[in-house]
Image (cartoon, grey):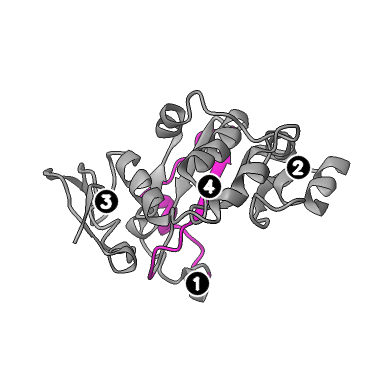
Amino acid sequence: EDGRNFLAMGNSRYDVIVSEPSNAWLSGASILFTREYFALIKNRLAEGGVFCQWFYSYSMSWDNILTLLKTLHAEFPNVRVFNFSKARFSGDLIILASRHRIDVTPRQVAGLDPRVSSIPELDWIRTFNDLMRGYVMGPDELRRLAAGRPMHTDNRPRLELRGPRDLFLDSQKNNLFQFVDNAPELTFEWTVESSGVDAALGVAPRFEPGAFRVEESGIRVGRVRYLACQPW
């Protein structure tokens, strides 16, 4: 609540705001996932600013994940969802949101401050593919999947009230398959292979037929869905 009050009482604007509260079903933390909170953040971002929101796909139903994403998308027209896993599928999500289009290009990644790769937790982000292998959803997919779904608001805190029931769900694998089945068609052939998903969940990536489209700066870009997965 301190973070929300800080934004509410100030008038400064920021290029980047990062929010990583506790789980959304906890009293107090729940208000850091509501539409009203996201509207407050939007008004505190500078022109071209980006909001980074942490969320989770473990012990959380797919319906409630979409509720959170729709709530965020209601305030930010441009939302991109990443599921980063260096050695295993953790179920943690990184969601980027902005009033403006969010573009990620090989040139941008090549221009990253070298200090980024010196951080032990980030030393695997060295190429455009390393970054994009975790990309699972954009505004087009979100708009289609979240249509007609409810939102999480101050007056109707659905995640706080419904989230505790999800603690008893073994939802991690199901949510992975949901992301996999609905991810954008343009992605990179080793997204699943390099993420450790196969070892963590006992699934094998099965790539649909397709050819490599182009080579960009030595990076092979395949117009295939990486996604169809099947049990061993």
Image quadrant for the C terminus?
bottom left
User: Of callouts 2 and 1, which one flags the residue occurring earlier in the amino acid sequence?
Assistant: 2
**Secondary structure state at the residue bearing disc 1:** helix
Q: Which residue is mark 4?
A: 95
Inter-mark Cα distance, 1 to 4: 18 Å
Q: Which residue is drawn at the image coordinates 72% and 51% (left, top)?
A: 29
Amino acid type, label 4? Ile
Inter-mark Cα distance, 3 to 2: 36 Å
Check disc 4: other Cα within 10 Å, few if <14, some if 14-19, many if 20+.
Answer: many
Amino acid type, label 1? Glu
Amino acid type, label 3? Phe
Cβ atoms at labels 3 and 2 below 8 Å apart: no
x and y percentages locating residue 209 in the rendered image: 11, 44
Q: Which residue is mark 2?
A: 13
User: Of callouts 4 and 2, which one flags the residue occurring earlier in the amino acid sequence?
Assistant: 2
Check disc 3: other Cα within 10 Å, few if <14, some if 14-19, many if 20+.
Answer: many
Inter-mark Cα distance, 4 to 2: 20 Å
Disc ID at residue 188? 3
- Magenta stretch? 87-115
Compared across the picture, whether 87 is left or right of 157 comes to left
**Secondary structure state at the residue bearing disc 3:** loop
Amino acid type, label 2? Arg
Q: Quadrant of residue 67?
A: top right
Disc ID at residue 121? 1
Compared across the picture, whether 37 is left or right of 79 comes to right
Inter-mark Cα distance, 2 to 1: 29 Å
Check disc 2: other Cα within 10 Å, few if <14, some if 14-19, many if 20+.
Answer: some
Compared across the picture, whether 5 is left or right of 111 comes to right
User: Of callouts 1 and 4, which one flags the residue occurring earlier in the amino acid sequence?
Assistant: 4
